[in-house]
Image (spheres, helix red, strand yellow):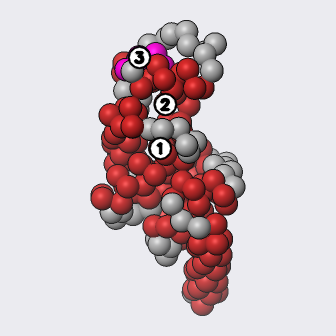
Amino acid sequence: MTLWWLRRPGTVASLSDRDLLNRARSGNSEAIRALLTPHEPLLFRLCLAILGNRADAEDAAQETLLAAIRALPKFRGDAQLSTWLVRIARNICTKRRPAALSLDDAALSVAGPEDAALERVVLQEALAHLTELQRTCLVLQAVEGWSIAEIAQSLSVTQKKVENELYRARKALARWEESTSGNEDGN
């Protein structure tokens, strides 16, 4: 999924984050790679959760990286880089609107391929009952381990809004689970 020129090995590890950012802003490809590569898994998982299709998620994640590279000279560094990248990814994914929903395979812990496939289908169905904002908040907190403050900053909403969306997401998932378990009992 990485842009091919971001994969070349280099040595910028000894630089401070500020120096790395300054070099990346000036177009240093090693610095750009060092800044963006660690965020690729997060961007892919977020895009996959929003779009639900692996190919679309890969495209959106790459589009996010390209947009970030183009906008890097304007990035002031007031927010964390991951927060800024999530905002870009979410905007890109919002334009594409999901048909189906999913989470990354790595987020699923199941025994075999058949179980994994079944769990993905169940998860897609469950996530389809959430709004895009609820899915995004849930993925960032449950899968990525972000704090409510980090999510709020990334999505440009208040912490209370994030808390409310997480609450609504969990309630919607509980209602969905209750309705599906009720269907299984009736069959």
Under circle 3, the secondary element is: loop
> Which is nearer the eye, 15 or 7?
15
Image check: 185 left or right of 66?
Answer: right
The C terminus appears in which quarter of the rendering? bottom right
- Outermost left residue: 96
Under circle 2, the secondary element is: helix
Q: Amino acid at mark 2?
A: Leu
Residue 139 falls in which quadrant of the image? bottom right
Residue 17 in the image, given as x and y percentages of width and height:
60, 26
Image height check: is 80 above or below 169? above
Q: Give the mark, 3 or 2, whose residue is nearer the N terminus.
A: 3
By secondary structure, the bulk of the magenta-drawn segment is best described as helix
For the image shown, how many numbered marks are present on the structure?
3
> Which is nearer the eye, 61 or 77?
77
Inspect the magenta stretch and tell me whether residue 30 lies in it. Answer: yes
Q: Give the mark, 3 or 1, whose residue is nearer the N terminus.
A: 3
> Which is nearer the eye, 148 or 120?
148
Residue 22 in the image, given as x and y percentages of width and height:
48, 23
Residue at the spot 42% in from the left edge and 55% down from the top edge: 90
- Cα distance between the residues tagged 3 and 1: 19 Å
The N terminus appears in which quarter of the rendering? top left
- Outermost bottom residue: 186
Q: Are marks 2 and 1 in contact (CB under 8 Å)?
A: yes
Q: Which residue is mark 3?
A: 28
Residue 150 in the image, given as x and y percentages of width and height:
63, 53
Q: Which residue is mark 2?
A: 36
Q: Amino acid at mark 1?
A: Leu
Q: Which residue is mark 1?
A: 85
> Which is nearer the eye, 93 or 14?
14
Image check: 3 left or right of 160?
Answer: left
Q: Which residues are magenta?
A: 27-31
Residue 121 in view (yes/no):
no
